[in-house]
Structure formats: structure tokens, C-alpha cells
Amino acid sequence: MSIQPLVQLEGITKSFGPNDVLKGVDLEVSSGEVVCILGPSGSGKSTLLRCINFIEQPTSGLVFVGDEVIGHRRTEDPEVLQQVHENAIARQRSEIGMVFQRFNLFPHMTVLENITHAPRLVRGHSAAAANEAAMTLLEKVGLADRATAYPRQLSGGQQQRVAIARALAMEPRLMLFDEPTSALDPELVGEVLKVMQELAAGGLTMIVVTHEIGFAREVADRVVFMDGGVIVEQGSPSEVIDNPQNPRTRAFLSRVLK
Amino acid sequence: MTPTQVTARITYRIVPVKHWARWIAAIATAAVLLWIVASFAGAQIDWPTVGEYFTFPAIVSGMGITVVLTVVSMLIGIALGVLVAVMRLSSNPVVSGIAWIYVWFFRGTPVYLQLLLWFNIALVFPVVGIPGLIEGRTVDVVSPFVAAILGLGLNQGAYTSEVVRAGILSVDEGQGEAAKALGLPGTATMRTVVLPQAMRVILPPIGNETIGMLKTTSLASAIGASEVLNEAQHVYLVNNMIMELLIVSGIWYLLAVSVLSVIQYYVERRFAKGSSSKALPLTPWQKVVWFFTSRRSVA
């Protein structure tokens, strides 16, 4: 693992009107690390994830991903950051993949079009090159035979696997998963977790907001427990899940592990 | 457990529901229709004249103007409508303010007034063009036809923008977020992800408005644009065949609306892609083809 972390969050706060959802979060994620964020609903874990790629702009704080400061540009003066326009943020986002709870596939496009859309439009890849790369990814998630189907013709688990392939098609150096299995029927959760486990084994840097304690225990290098808009406790899965120190972590785990 | 009792099964006779109200309504409707047809047949209407004027050059060219006015005004209206809707939803307060004022003005005044305004615009701007490059007297540039297109198109843009805005708002927020997360710029997100999905909501009212526009073009006769109703009036002021010529224009309007309805059907179908887990139903034409080919193969 490199010394310089790939992702560095510094004092992230986010308020929606009078509602303070994030109250100052610091987090570092190394390259190749898999971090699972656990916490009760309303703890701010999804908002934190959405702040990393500026889908939600933090009220204050900075997000460093690699050399980039998301939403900003470095200037000649090392102590001055220039805020940038939406299109420049879009370029920064293209390096960060995101998978949503509700899949959010484009319903008017086929599976293949969903995956090739951004590589062609944003990266300027040719149709042939994008299709080839997409088919490789579809094979990886086990859906090569559904390339011409429309999202509505797929099960939830299949849709989420396509959504993962769509995000991977941009060759991101970081993947964000926002409760990727929460909208799935119980029997479909396994197929999505299996794909994610393979990605983790392949060395992809992943930040996963999840309720799947089993997945966190097995796959995560580090587990972060959030409550009330702050990180309450973090450490290895065995530390946080099996031997939690904080009473809030203990209360949460005793509820979900019942 | 008692042994199963063996009973003779009753063969029920099923009595269908009687639709008395339908019958009464059908008979009443038929009676009224018969009365209207009889009135027209018995009135002083010279039907051969209707047939004769149906293809009268002035009427046909007037219909051509009506169609051109409809198509061009709608194209301007839709282009403006999309632009203004996107402006209205912009986070830039200046941009959304301009859009709001546009809609407020053009929706707030009668289209008839707007037509008269454009027709007489020379009273405010006597000269148009780029000073020193191209200039012209407004009276020469803004003909009744140009005034009609400006008036109808700009008015339509205000209404269409609200239709488009409703369509955009109907698309799930997650769609825009997914596009954003993939690194698509705002314009590409709107053009390739949000608008194609909004089309399903936008198209039925646009079809409605196009049909409305076809008929609203008749208002342009007030500023002397030579559309079909204006031409019909010119003819009947000479030959006094009022009813005949109104019937001629009426048939032309109905014909044009019928064509528009067919076009609407196919355009809506085009944008229904992926909207259902089932295949699209056959079009009426495909049903006809299927009916004949499948019969033949059986025979």
C-alpha cells in the first residue's frame, strides 16, 4: 500500500437547510483498500458517499482523490484552490465510479448502450472499441447474453450487475457503492455481492455503504461505523464488528445481527 | 373426516349482463345524428359546389399555407419550448428569470393580440437588420405570413416550455445523478438521458397542441395571411356560397388532423422503446398485414 492515500476526506460537513447531516468527517482510503461504511439510517453514510464525487456538494471540507481536489483546481499559490464549473467537476467524476441503490440504468437504452454511452460520449471511444470493452465487462458480471435487452426486461440483481459494469467501463480508480443490495429481493443479493467480492479481490479501491454485515466482515479491509453525522469507530472487521468498543456501535450491531 | 358426499352437479345457465344504458345511448345518438344529417341534406346546400371547390386552386394553396404555418410555428414553438424549459430549470437566477418573464408575457396575452402586435411591429421598429450591413424597412420584411409565424411560434413556445418542463420533472432524479456520476456534462445529460425519457410525457400534449395549432392558424386570416379559411372567405364573399365553402374548409381541416393523428401515433411508438418489459403491440397496419398473410398461409 502506498503512503499517500488515494482518497482523503478533510472535515466534510453537509447541511440541508437547518439539518446538519454531516458534522465533520475525516477519512483516508489507500489504493486497493476496501472500506465498508456501516451505520443506522440517517447517520449520513450515503450523504458522505455522495459528497466524495460531488453529486452532493459538501457545505465545507475538502475531498482529495489522487492528485485532484474534487470541485476545485490547484493554483500557482499552493495555499489557494480555485472552485471550478460543473463541466470540470464532470471530468473529475469520470474517474470515480458509482453504483446506486436503485440501479439508475437508463431505461431507454439497451444493456450494451448503457455501458458504452459514457465511454463514447465522455472519452470519445469508437463504437467498436466501446462495444468490445463492454462485452468483456458483461462477461465478467455474467450477463454477456443480455447485451441487447432493455433494463426493464432484467431482474433487479441483473440490473445492478449491469450498473456495476457501466461504472467499470469508465475505468475508474475508485468505486463508490451506495447500498447496492438494499433494493434487491433477498435471493438476488448474493449474485451482486459475488461480483463485488471479485472486484475487491482484483485490487479495486472501493468504498461501500452497506447493511450487509456478512459482506463487510468477509471482504472489507476496514469497517467504518457512522452515527449522527460523524465517524464513531473504525478498524478491521474483527475489531469493529466482533469486538466493538463504542456503545452506539454495539447497540447498532446487536440490532442488525439479531 | 366425513366421506365425500356425492351430489349431482348442476349445469348452470349463465345470463350475460344486459347493457341497457348503452342501447339507450346508442339509439339517442343515432337519432340526433340522423336529425343533423337530415337538416344539412334538406338545407339550401349545393353539394356539387362543395365537391367542385374542394380542389379549387385558391383553397388548395390556402391549405398549403395552413400546413406550412402549422409546421413552421410548431418547429419554432418546440425549439423555443425546450430551450425555455431548460432555462427555467437552470440554477442561474438570471437565466431562469428571463424564461419566467417570457412565459409570463406570451401566455398572458391573447394570441390574436400577439398576431396584431407582430403585424404592426413597424410602428415600434421602423427598420430591421444589422446597422450598416443589412437593413430593411420593417413593413417590407414582416409580411402577414412572417407576422403569423412570429406570433404563432412565439406564443406556442411559451406553452410548449411548460409541457417540456413537466416532462423533464417527470424523469426520476436518479437518472440525472447516474449520468453525472459517469462524468457526463450537463448538456449531454439533458440531451441523451433526460429529454429522451421526458419525451414519453411530452409527446401526447405536443400532439394535442399541433392539432390545436392547425386550427389556430385560422386566426392569421385576421392579419391577411392567405391560409385556407381566409381563402374560403374570399371565395364566398364573391359567390355567396357560404355554407358550401365552410364545409370545404372543414373537410380539409379534418383530413389534416387525421394525418397528424397517425403521425403522432408512430412518433409516440418510436419513443416507447424500453418503456415496458413486453414487446410493443402491433400497429394497425401491421395487424392488417398479419391478418392477410396468416390467412393465406393457412389456406
Image: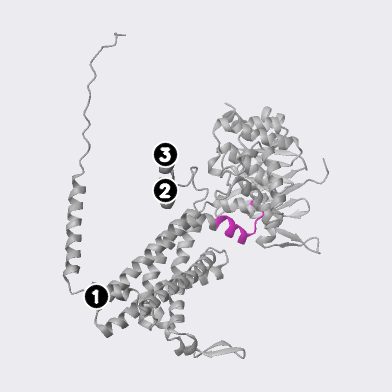
Determine the chain carrying the residue at label 2: B
Circle 1 residue: B243
Q: Nearer the viewer, residue B53 or B292?
A: B292
Marks 2 & 3 on one chain: yes
Q: Nearer the viewer, mark 3 or mark 1?
A: 3
Count residues near mark 2 (Cα–Cα under 10 Å), then give few for <14, some for 14-19, many for 20+.
few
Q: Quadrant of the C terminus of chain B?
A: top left
Please count the marks in the image: 3
Q: Nearer the viewer, mark 2 or mark 3?
A: 3
Determine the chain carrying the residue at label 1: B
Marks 1 & 2 on one chain: yes
Identified by mark 2, the residue type is Lys
Percent across and percent down for residue A78 are 81, 60
Place residue B43 in its image quadrant: bottom left
Circle 2 residue: B287
What mark, if any, has residue B133 been given in the picture?
Answer: none
Is residue A138 placed above or below B125 in the rendered structure? above
Q: Element type at marker 3? A: helix
Instruction: Please give left or right for residue B289 compared with residue B96 in the image.
Output: left
Question: Label 2 to label 3, Cα distance in Å?
Answer: 16 Å
- Picture residue at 59% right of the left edge, 27% below the top: A257
Q: Element type at marker 2? A: helix
Identified by mark 3, the residue type is Val
Magenta part of the protein: which range? Answer: B181-194
Circle 3 residue: B298
- Picture residue at 41% right of the left edge, 59% below the top: B262
- Picture residue at 65% right of the left edge, 42% below the top: A164
Is residue B252 placed above or below B123 in the rendered structure? above
Residue B112 visible in this rendered orientation of the protein: no
Q: Dominant secondary structure of the magenta stretch?
A: helix
Question: Label 3 to label 1, Cα distance in Å?
Answer: 52 Å
Identified by mark 1, the residue type is Met
